[in-house]
Image: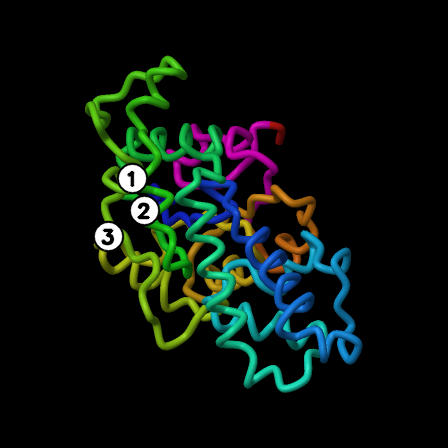
Amino acid sequence: MPKFRGAIFDVDGVLVDSPHQKAWRESLRELMESDWRDIRDRTTWSPEAFTAHLYQEYVSGKPRMSGARAVLDYFSVPDAAGRVAEYAQRKQEMVVRLIEAGDFTAYPDALRFVIAAKDAGMLIADASSSKNAALFLRKIRLDTFAKEQGISSPSLRPGLSLLDYFDADVSGRDFAHGKPDPEIFLTAAQELGVEPRDAIVLEDASAGVEAAKAGGMAAIGIARADDAELLAAADADIVVTSLDDVDTAALAEGWLATRKA
């Protein structure tokens, strides 16, 4: 079996613990307690009903407008089509404020995996539906992380951000079709110069795993939100709770396995 030549990373939930879920939840709460309070009793919404499971199953991995519409439909909000733009805009304004305030963290296991993948000779790309992805990636100093972790790599240099480290950046683009359509991942593979069959996708959302498989790629599901069953049902090749659990030696040989296996 040929070695994998490319690795394509989703951002939110894979590389960073971002405030997206918080922004979706709190911006809807703000609306329901102010501008939309007159329709609140006609919906199924409550502050406690916007759960992590809801976010993972209906919102995560989708373009902003699609995610907003999915939430409004889930809570049976009247005139969802007429309200979706307002909700999406409110969420975007909130998430930008949270990002600029530094309300996010990079996952150490993901940064270790990114460096290991590049050192193994793989080309790497970030491919998130979020238009905020570059804001995260630009703020993460990979050289500082490597120094703190005692990681030495010829691919690292002083002042290197995670955004600079990627060979291709296709996040935040306006594609005709969002996940679970494979367009974003196929574009990433094309820009890396890698055939889909030689690429792996790293995703935390079932829609993203479905997109990877629809594009003929291998998929690693990362169950950071107690959603391993959702990722497995989407046909992820392996599901892990941490990228430290991926057997990198097996990966270098062209197959996916966990260290525990």
Amino acid type assigned to the residue bearing label 1 in the image: Met
In percent of the image, x 69 and y 44: which residue is there? 226
Disc 2 packing (10 Å; few <14; some 14–19; many ≥20): many
Residue 241 circle label: none
- Answer left or right for 27 relative to 174: right
Q: Position of residue 246 (x, y in %)?
A: 51, 33
The residue under label 1 is 122
Q: Is residue 158 above or below residue 85?
A: above
Spatial distance from mark 2 to mark 3, Cα to Cα?
7 Å
Label 3: element kind: helix
Q: Earlier in the sequence, mark 3 or mark 1?
A: 1
Q: Amino acid at mark 3?
A: Leu
Q: Residue at x 34, y 30 (%)?
A: 115
Provide residue 68's location: percent of width, then percent of height. 55, 70
Residue 192 is tagged as 3
In which quadrant of the rendered view does residue 165 lie? top left
Residues shaded magenta: 237-259
Residue at 68% of width from left, 84% of height from top? 78
- As for residue 254 lying within the magenta part, the answer is yes
> Does the CB distance between marks 1 and 2 fall below 8 Å?
yes
What separation in Å lies between label 1 and label 2 (alpha carbons)?
5 Å
Specify the quadrant that holds the C terminus. top right
Q: Position of residue 40 (x, y in %)?
A: 74, 74
Q: Nearer the viewer, residue 19 or 115?
A: 19
* Local secondary structure at mark 1: loop
The image quarter containing residue 63 is bottom left
Left or right of 108 in this view: 242: right
In the image, residue 79 above or below residue 84: below
- Look at mark 2 in the image and give the residue it sits on: 6
Quadrant of the rendering where the N terminus is positioned: top left
